[in-house]
Image (spheres, helix red, strand yellow):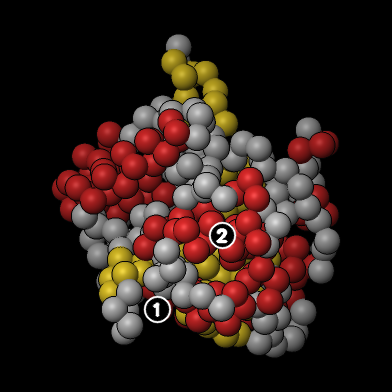
Amino acid sequence: MEVDPPLLATTSVTDINIESIGAQAMGQSCFLQTSPEFFMKRLLVSGAGDIYSLGKVFREAEQGSRHNPEFTLLEWYRLDWDEFQLISEVENLVIGAYQSIQNIEIPVSRINYGDCFEQTLGIDPHKAKLSILQSLVEEKGYPQWGSETRANCLDLLFTEFVEPKLSKGLVTVHDYPACQAALAQTYKDAKGRLVSRRFESFLNGLELANGYFELTDAEQQSQRFQHDVKQRQQANKPVMSIDAKLDQAMRQGLPSCSGVALGVDRLLMQLSQAQSINEVLAFPWDRC
């Protein structure tokens, strides 16, 4: 079922890597939404069932060949599905788009985060000590990152050195590090490593979709949000309030589900072989 979540709300995400755009409404500070996730989860709790949203979202400080502060996001949730069932649906969607628009087949593959990281950089990202990751970041030419967190070091190393070596076509990387779980559940893999049930899909090297086997434990979610707030304080970033309405809904019980958010503009870029997101937007930011 299609749903129509609000674009403007009194709260937004606490994620340290996402900045919200502020606004004023009804005499109080508000935010343009960075994704419909929190509202959609409240709908899931209320019994909405399988749902999707196709609409605009907004993020501050995101502009470039792959970014625009306003963009189109397709987000959907499937009840009683795990992340691999959802990965299959993402693959089918992208395969179908290429067949319909370009009449070609694209290669599709999946790889474990730990495997592709170790193949490229020679260390196990799940087991390596923070000091090892910090030293590696410095060796790779980023001395100012030598005191960064585990999550930030892994993010830099993956983005700069692993992503460029991913295969062409649609590649889905799964089992991300536990420190990058966001709102995904965690589990111990076959090697006894704690990993998150999170995946990201890359289309010809361009990050396209981010999905989770969703966390349903309200207390654990609250602890993660509180950790985000502390990280934002330490990084001197604007402190975001925790969404009390989402917390209340989660304590009523989020059903077992998987969810994914897919960047529609980025998919259009690849389908049209555009070099910049501006080529697939009628009104990119510099024309607004």
2 or 1: mark nearer the eye: 2
Residue 285 is left or right of residue 107, and the answer is right
Depth check: give the residue in front, 132 or 62: 132
Q: How many numbered badges does the structure rendering display?
A: 2
- Expressed as whole percent of the image width and height from the top left, the position of residue 235 reads 50, 35
Q: Which callout, 2 or 1, points at the residue further toward the start of the chain?
A: 1
Say if residue 10 shows up in the picture. Answer: yes
Residue ID for mark 2: 135
| Residue type marked 2 | Ser
- Tell which of 200 and 72 is nearer to you: 200
Foreground of the two, 215 or 88: 215
Quadrant hosting residue 12: top left
Looking at the picture, which amino acid does disc 1 mark? Gln
Give residue 46's position: percent from left, percent from top.
24, 50
Q: Residue at x 21, y 39 (%)?
A: 248
Q: Which residue is mark 1?
A: 85
What residue is rendered at 75% in x and 70% in y? 271
Q: Quadrant of the N terminus?
A: bottom left
Within 10 Å of disc 2 (Cα), the crowding (few <14, some 14-19, many 20+) is: some
Q: Along the horizontal axis of the image, is 229 left or right of 192?
A: right
Residue 134 coordinates in the image, percent (x, y): 53, 57
Residue 78 seen from this side: no
Q: Residue furthest top?
A: 27
Give how far across and how far down residue 74 sits, in percent: 54, 58
- Kindly report the distance in space between the C-alpha atoms of the residues bearing marks 2 and 1: 38 Å
Helix or strand or loop: what does disc 2 sit on? helix
Report crowding for label 1: few under 14, some 14 to 19, many 20 or more residues within 10 A (C-alpha).
few
Work out whether residue 1 or residue 193 is closer to the camera in this orientation and state it.
193
Quadrant for residue 129, please give it: bottom left
